[in-house]
Image: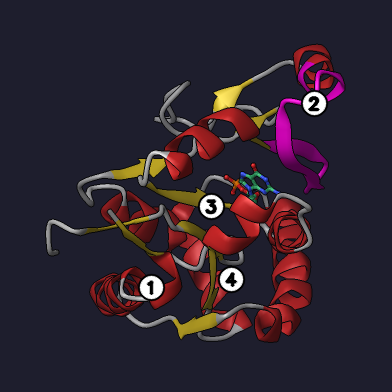
Amino acid sequence: MSKRFGRSGILFVISAPSGAGKTTLVEAIRQTPNLFYSVSCTTRTPRSGEIDGKDYRFLSDADFRTRLGGGDFLEHAQVHGDFYGTLREPILTNLKNGVDVLIDIDTQGAATIRNCDDPVIRQALADVFIMPPDLEELRRRLHKRGTETEQQINRRLETAAREMELWRDYRYTIVSGSVEEDLEKFRHIMAAEGYLSRRMIQK
Ligand code: 5GP
């Protein structure tokens, strides 16, 4: 970009029903240079292989409530019986410094951010829905992952069916194919969002 122009940071919000291959996709997008990934707080138990501070900040119920009371969260929601929350401060700081931010949150969280009062957040927002192929494929993927019981899988599929109704609320929808295809489509969105005139800052 010309020396006379910079641009403000973009807030990429990605929502995808559980098991849609999102974790792999998000892992790949996280490799993008100059992109800050917002690590969510959660009260859910870590899955095997998950690292505290990288995948989530795993908090006790009490710690989560303390942070909630302190106004630390930009949004929070209860998903499958556990609390999840996005920390506000790192997001605002990065956006103000012109750094793009990625957050991976459910449809409730995306709705909260869309309706947020903060003009910096609203201006920065680019929300993307990853539409899983169909519920049967989703069931197969969740079985293959093998981290949930049958009951938990059914619960996740019910949530997925509800969430899949909400794709129209998002600026972009990617109908999920292979991870490589999804990644390529996501990169196109990132590039186009970066060229929006309203994000340009003339120095
Ligand atoms: P999982 O337990 O499978 O990692 O995530 C369950 C759901 O919670 C996913 O849809 C994920 O996007 C969502 N989630 C993760 N972090 C947050 C967060 O900070 N806020 C909200 N609202 N949802 C989140």
**Which comes before the other along the chain, label 3 or label 2?**
2
- Mark 3: which amino acid? Asp
Picture coordinates of residue 90, whole percent (x, y): 51, 30
- Alpha-carbon span between mark 4 and mark 3: 21 Å
**Which comes before the other along the chain, label 2 or label 1?**
2
Instruction: Check whether the beta carbons of the residues at disc 3 and disc 2 lie within 8 A of each other.
Output: no
**Which comes before the other along the chain, label 1 or label 3?**
3
- Alpha-carbon span between mark 3 and mark 2: 20 Å
| Residue for badge 4 | 139
- Mark 2: which amino acid? Gly
Looking at the picture, does residue 157 appear above or below residue 58?
Answer: below
**Which comes before the other along the chain, label 4 or label 3?**
3
**Is the CB–ligand 1 distance for label 3 below 8 Å?**
yes
Query: Dot 4: few (<14), some (14–19), or many (≥20) neighbours within 10 Å?
Result: some
Disc 3 element: strand
Looking at the picture, does residue 104 appear above or below residue 42?
Answer: below
| Residue for badge 2 | 71
**Which comes before the other along the chain, label 4 or label 2?**
2
Given residues 108 and 131, the one toward you in this image is: 108
Q: Nearer the viewer, mark 1 or mark 4?
A: 1
The residue at 53%/52% (across/down) is: 104
Query: Dot 1: few (<14), some (14–19), or many (≥20) neighbours within 10 Å?
Result: some
Query: Dot 3: few (<14), some (14–19), or many (≥20) neighbours within 10 Å?
Result: many
User: How many numbered badges does the structure rendering display?
Assistant: 4
Picture coordinates of residue 146, whole percent (x, y): 50, 50
Q: Nearer the viewer, mark 4 or mark 2?
A: 2
| Residue for badge 3 | 104
Residue 193's tag is 1
**Is the CB–ligand 1 distance for label 1 below 8 Å?**
no
Disc 4 element: helix
The residue at 52%/81% (across/down) is: 172
